[in-house]
Image: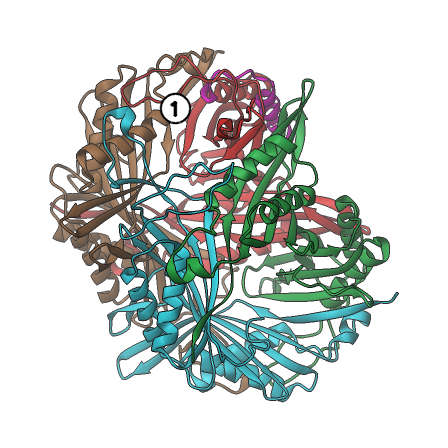
Chain colours: A green, B cyan, C red, D brown
Amino acid sequence: MAIVLGPNRYGKAETRLVRVTRDGGVHHLKDLNVSCALSGDMTAVHLTGDNAAVLPTDTQKNTVYAFAARHGVGEIEDFALLLARHYVGTQPAVHHARVEIEEYPWDRLGDHSFVRGGGEARTCLVHHDRDGRTTVVSGLTGLVVLNSTGSEFRGFAVDEYTTLRPAAARVLATAIDARWRQEGERAAHATVRRHLLEAFAGTYSLSLQQTLYAMGERVLASCPQVCEIRLAMPNRHHFAVDLTPFGLDNDNEVFHAADRPYGLIEGTVLREDAPDAGFAWE
Amino acid sequence: MAIVLGPNRYGKAETRLVRVTRDGGVHHLKDLNVSCALSGDMTAVHLTGDNAAVLPTDTQKNTVYAFAARHGVGEIEDFALLLARHYVGTQPAVHHARVEIEEYPWDRLGDHSFVRGGGEARTCLVHHDRDGRTTVVSGLTGLVVLNSTGSEFRGFAVDEYTTLRPAAARVLATAIDARWRQEGERAAHATVRRHLLEAFAGTYSLSLQQTLYAMGERVLASCPQVCEIRLAMPNRHHFAVDLTPFGLDNDNEVFHAADRPYGLIEGTVLREDAPDAGFAWE
Amino acid sequence: MAIVLGPNRYGKAETRLVRVTRDGGVHHLKDLNVSCALSGDMTAVHLTGDNAAVLPTDTQKNTVYAFAARHGVGEIEDFALLLARHYVGTQPAVHHARVEIEEYPWDRLGDHSFVRGGGEARTCLVHHDRDGRTTVVSGLTGLVVLNSTGSEFRGFAVDEYTTLRPAAARVLATAIDARWRQEGERAAHATVRRHLLEAFAGTYSLSLQQTLYAMGERVLASCPQVCEIRLAMPNRHHFAVDLTPFGLDNDNEVFHAADRPYGLIEGTVLREDAPDAGFAWE
Amino acid sequence: MAIVLGPNRYGKAETRLVRVTRDGGVHHLKDLNVSCALSGDMTAVHLTGDNAAVLPTDTQKNTVYAFAARHGVGEIEDFALLLARHYVGTQPAVHHARVEIEEYPWDRLGDHSFVRGGGEARTCLVHHDRDGRTTVVSGLTGLVVLNSTGSEFRGFAVDEYTTLRPAAARVLATAIDARWRQEGERAAHATVRRHLLEAFAGTYSLSLQQTLYAMGERVLASCPQVCEIRLAMPNRHHFAVDLTPFGLDNDNEVFHAADRPYGLIEGTVLREDAPDAGFAWE
């Protein structure tokens, strides 16, 4: 039976763009990592090496820089859409474009001085095809949070390999990776972020799954623009150290922060009538 | 409209297991990174924090170690299947298990002495559900290869943002990430790896897409057990340095190995009659 | 000629300690990475494997946790000194202890909720020996800063391999790694950090060396407790992209943020009468 | 009291050079990471921003590439010496040059095809000053090894914080970082590497310190060119998992490979009459 080409895409990944905008003597900074991926009529290049349909990834890099100069960079979703529409609109062989952007935060030190704001990144993933279908997923990653109490874990299933004892109190720590799908209008990024943090801090947690769901539900309840949110949250275990050999109590005060293994909780919260996602998450 | 729970899973990620087996005075070593993820009847834990259906991720970690002791570790796909079937078979609330394993290679130094074999890892991704459906994807990642000639790139699409000039000869380097789906019998891992390397080295490359397809086709043509292969290959650019300011030629001898951005080529090669993948790649 | 043992040390590295302190319902958090290294009368263990003088690294880990419980964790320098004095004071074979600590910042979200404050870490390196000599080096690392103007680079030495053109304006970005030696009293960490940032932002830069010196000088001029400061600052190049092929100007607005190579500027600023550093920096 | 400039240096770090050499149709590959650092008459640039003495780091990058073209790349120590002598010999303000190189191994797949040989790197650190003093330190890093038996740890010092029990058998694993100083002639890199591996595998270990010393001693005893060797070896703990809750024995067969914390053993082995190291290790 014949061997055939299946789904494929190609592009320039991780173009590191810093865009400075001047407002008199006051400068503004956007620090992005842009990844483009194109697909379409690409059979020839795979089967025979005919590159006629291939817009080089080097050109995609140039396009990112040229568009940043010509159009500026506002919300990353808008910049991603601009790029995606450009590729599909100008290259006949390109039927579909996927643009993913990470934005790194900077805090202001002075009129033209800045300090990096941490490990967190704002993200977006945009798709656009030649039939005019467009999807927008916004997100954030690397937002590390911790509750030092207000978390328990008990009443769980037990089998012959279970040694864990129920915990009436524990540290709950995670690195939030959240992506939310929007139709039409977009929610303000800072608003979604605030709801995630408030739900994390404000939920008395019986399990990380419950906290995850509460975070997603809060975003959907508060932001009508969001129809679906996907959360991936590692359980960054903080084990209370057994200090009894040293004649000491440990009333949840001294913890070993472990690297691996870790729990990994992944879940989706969505509106019952959310439109079909199509290629939004691909 | 109601807010509901969508797809979800949870488990213990990255349990680092080293298993020693003794054959008289000669030892054998398996070095694995095991990630389990379970799903099923998990609505209650998300909505109310009722953990009755939740087999703790700590128990999953214990299970990995106990199974390694009891059953040994042979091919990672078999170990993953053993675990996946166990979870689904023993926990009523678990309807589906996903087990992903990375194996790190070691070379022998002596009867019980070993040296790590490099950055490459062998991988597998196994799914099993309570309806008895099972999928197996094998793979490798981090296999870094380079052709110092036998690669060109020209005849590509040009637009107003294109500055790249056609290259009659270039270095072609990539880190192969390959995953192949198998039905029933499995291909020998070393065989697939060998075909990938031979196709990479033996293909005169007009584009990395063409090389990718040639690699996938070679595996499918040589290994009847494989019905689909997915390849993700970054183009690790090696730019010939312009030495003319120093009165020197550079006949593709001196290169700057760049970090970012990089091209990223992703593609699938499959048999036309490959059975539906189901959840194999999730 | 005889082969002999030279300088040596051993210890437990990267013990990850999180310490929670309760102030009524309000919690406080210290998140540390503690590395201990001991040296002394260790010839026997190296030459014959006699471990009688070796306090196990596992014991050192236990000590970190037990001391955190018993004494709490205040300033990391004080915690490091406590540990160093303990090892030297209680183990006859240990003549010298070196304790290095990294502290990760958390911002408050609620009474017992926190969010990680970024990639920056506060550091200290403490030495103590059985003759009672003690040294304290405080520091910070991973403090990433950027000036979008107010930096030039010209008038540099030129040879036959120079192609760089003078820059009347450029982006200046770096990740500050600063370590400062103190005798007796210690400067407030936040004060030193503030002077570093103010000097970075406030110096019109003719070279990164000049900026580095200005930063060190500012700290010494403002903090009498500090007798020496060492700075290591990579020049994180932001190259203005050439947009002329696309008919666009680039008046220092669009930059490629490069990974490698990077400039690396290292320098010491000290008081002329600074006491001898001894083993402070080892 | 006056504030003054102390020791300083600057240069281009991590220039990634790949050099291809053709031998008819057969190609040879050198893959290097080169870091240069210059020092000398650099007071003006620090104090006033006068760059007249500063050979730009960009020029240093160019020099690396131009020298690779003109002179080829043989042993990395020779290439480093060539660069160091060039800077000191041609720039009056440069009184001292430090060149550090990492070389990454590639295995041959075909006449012009290669596969990366793993995480290990060969290293060198070379110093040269205008008084003609030259030092050469060769090395390797990231050489990960494991003995699955032939290692014990007992008879150690015990205090009130000791909970570790003596181990009659354990896994011993480490990532070797070795640097050796040579005067005049140099030992063959492969020879030193072989002795390190043989001593690791062949030593019945009572402690990692003893193994470290045995490795260093073996190199010195076998390679007269080496006068001093420094080893840094993390103890990558492999903890035998307690399987008794599951009714299983664990006769050193099933291990948890831990990330952090880890032991860190550092030691020097040298000839009693080794010449003074001077700046060799700086």
Q: Residues within 10 Å of mark 1 (few under 14, many from 20)?
A: many
Give, as a single range, the part of the protein colored magenta.
C187-209
Q: Which amino acid does label 1 sit on?
A: Asn
Instruction: Using the rendered view, name the quadrant where residue B111 is placed.
Output: bottom left
Q: Tell me which residue sits at (43%, 66%) in the image.
A: B178
Q: Position of residue D15 (x, y in %)?
A: 35, 37
x 40%, y 14%: residue: D51
- The reply, left or right, for residue B67 in relation to residue A198 is left
SS category of the residue bearing label 1? strand
Q: Is residue D241 left or right of residue B187?
A: right
Compared with residue B31, is residue A183 higher up or lower down, i.e. above or below? above
Please determine whether, in this image, residue A264 is positioned above or below residue A131: below
Q: Is the magenta stretch mostly helix, strand or loop?
A: helix
Determine the residue positioned at 54% across, 56% down.
A39
Q: Mark 1 points at which residue?
A: D8
Rendering coords of residue C98 (x, y %): 45, 43
Residue D245 visible? The answer is no
**Residue C196 painted magenta:** yes
Q: Is residue B173 visible?
A: yes
C251 or C104: which is nearer to us?
C251
* D184 and B35: which is toward the camera: B35
Residue A132 vs residue D141, the one in the foreground: A132
Determine the residue positioned at 61% across, 28% down.
Answer: A20
Q: Is residue C53 magenta?
A: no
Q: Tag 1, which chain?
A: D
Indicate the position of residue A48 as horizontal and vertical percent values.
Answer: 38, 60
